Image (cartoon, rainbow, N blue to C red):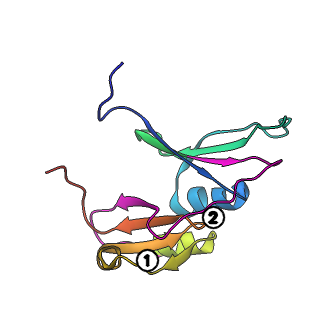
Amino acid sequence: MTLDAHSHLRIARPSLDLAAAERFWVEGLGLSIVWRTPEGAGHAPGEHDLLMLGWPDATWHLELVHEPGAPVRPRPTEEDLLVLYVDGEVPEDAVARLEAHGGKRVQSPNPYWNEWGVTVEDPDGYRLVLCTRAWSNS
């Protein structure tokens, strides 16, 4: 077993409305559905509906979880961020598409993100930052 930069990363979050979350992340941002709980699957106590989203070649994916019998309310803070580095201006049509699919453009309490990006809340209140900078390990 090797833990390194090639290890796959899963970010798991609760969601109150997987359909709304799917509209935001898939139709708004352009992620693909990696996997989801099959339609009409029975729900025993403790079983969850899952929606896994990502880009096909990415080494990470976003897992959204909803337990119909005992939903967990998302409790994001202003600093719970998923940051995507776009290496250039953030396209206004991308922000408009996120807003049209349930997102809400917000100001960050951290001036860095306001200067270097655009912050959009998803339907569960988690924040996505589209950063104008490029990521560099150096």
Q: How far across and how far down the image is residue 112, in percent?
A: 29, 75
State the residue in front, 6 or 126: 126
Query: How far apart are the two marked residues, 1 and 2, measured between alpha carbons?
Result: 22 Å
Figure check: 1 above or below 132: above
Figure check: 71 above or below 125: above
Q: Quadrant of residue 92?
A: bottom left
Q: How far across and how far down the image is residue 75, in percent?
A: 60, 62
Give the magenta part as a residue range: 63-92
Tell me if residue 116 is in the magenta stretch: no
Kind of residue at badge 2: Asp
- Compare marks 1 and 2 and give the one earlier in the sequence: 1
For label 2, the crowd category at 10 Å Cα-Cα, with few meaning under 14, some 14 to 19 and many 20 or more, is many
Kind of residue at badge 1: Glu
Tell me if residue 75 is in the magenta stretch: yes
The reply, left or right, for residue 117 in relation to residue 48 is left
Mark 1: which secondary structure?
Answer: helix
Residue at screen point 40% across, 78% down: 109
> What secondary structure is the stretch in magenta mostly built from?
loop
State if disc 2 and disc 1 touch (CB < 8 Å): no
State the residue in front, 92 or 9: 9
> To which residue does mark 2 refer?
124
Q: How far across and how far down the image is residue 58, in percent?
A: 41, 41
| Numbered badge on residue 92 | 1
| Numbered badge on residue 123 | none
Residue at screen point 52% across, 52% down: 31
